[in-house]
């Protein structure tokens, strides 16, 4: 009998399309490293792709990595897969996506609005990091013998 060293995982067409559509839309997929043998979390659903198990995402993305359609990074128990140009073309053909639709990672981002309650920079007035206040010396303008703020007096000034 023939034994495969890497048994393949069957993923339903519905789930495969859900994963690939998400990958094309976002340009990147993240999945926590889990395995069904050692971790029950592998059997739970992926947090971003509804109805799809985390393990299915990992296995399908490993397949795309081996075909060099995505690049893989791994950090802090999480896989990150980034769609490359070949992957974009492959998915565009596979999912019948028009040429003018591009993944979010390729869209030009506009400058985000300032956080609520914060005025835009032009309305805020002068910067508050003004150092001139402590460089001027004591009130009255007599700098002789004035050392400013701080702990150390430093070496005596030459006469």
Image (spheres, grey):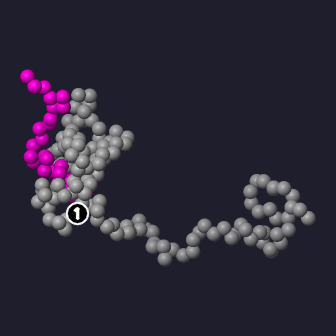
Q: Position of residue 109 (x, y in %)?
A: 33, 66
Residue at 30 percent of width and 43 percent of height: 79
Is 25 on the left-hand or right-hand side of 74?
left
Q: Position of residue 11 (x, y in %)?
A: 12, 41
Q: Is residue 99 visible?
A: yes
Q: Is residue 2 or residue 98 the one in the foreground?
A: 2
Residue at 63 percent of width and 69 percent of height: 130
Numbered-mark total: 1
Q: Is residue 146 magenta?
A: no
Residue labelled with disc 1: 102
Q: Position of residue 101 (x, y in %)?
A: 19, 65
Residue at 80 percent of width and 74 percent of height: 141
**Residue farthest along the right direction in this orientation:** 159
Magenta region: 1-28
Q: Is residue 6 magenta?
A: yes
Q: Position of residue 2 (x, y in %)?
A: 10, 25
């Amino acid at each position: 009998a023939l034994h495969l060293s890497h048994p393949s995982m069957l993923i339903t067409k519905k789930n495969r399309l859900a994963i690939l559509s998400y990958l094309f839309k976002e340009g990147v997929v993240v999945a926590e490293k889990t395995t069904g043998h050692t971790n029950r979390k592998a059997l739970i659903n992926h947090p971003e792709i509804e109805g799809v198990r985390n393990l299915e995402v990992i296995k399908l993305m490993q397949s795309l990595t081996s075909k060099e359609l995505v690049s893989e990074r791994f950090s802090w128990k999480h896989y990150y897969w980034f769609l490359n140009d070949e992957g974009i073309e492959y998915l565009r053909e596979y999912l019948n996506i028009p040429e003018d639709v591009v993944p979010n990672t390729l869209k030009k981002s506009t400058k985000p609005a300032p956080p609520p309650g914060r005025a835009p920079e032009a309305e805020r007035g002068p910067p508050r990091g003004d150092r001139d206040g402590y460089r001027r010396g004591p009130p009255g303008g007599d700098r002789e013998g004035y050392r400013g703020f701080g702990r150390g007096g430093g070496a005596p000034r030459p006469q």
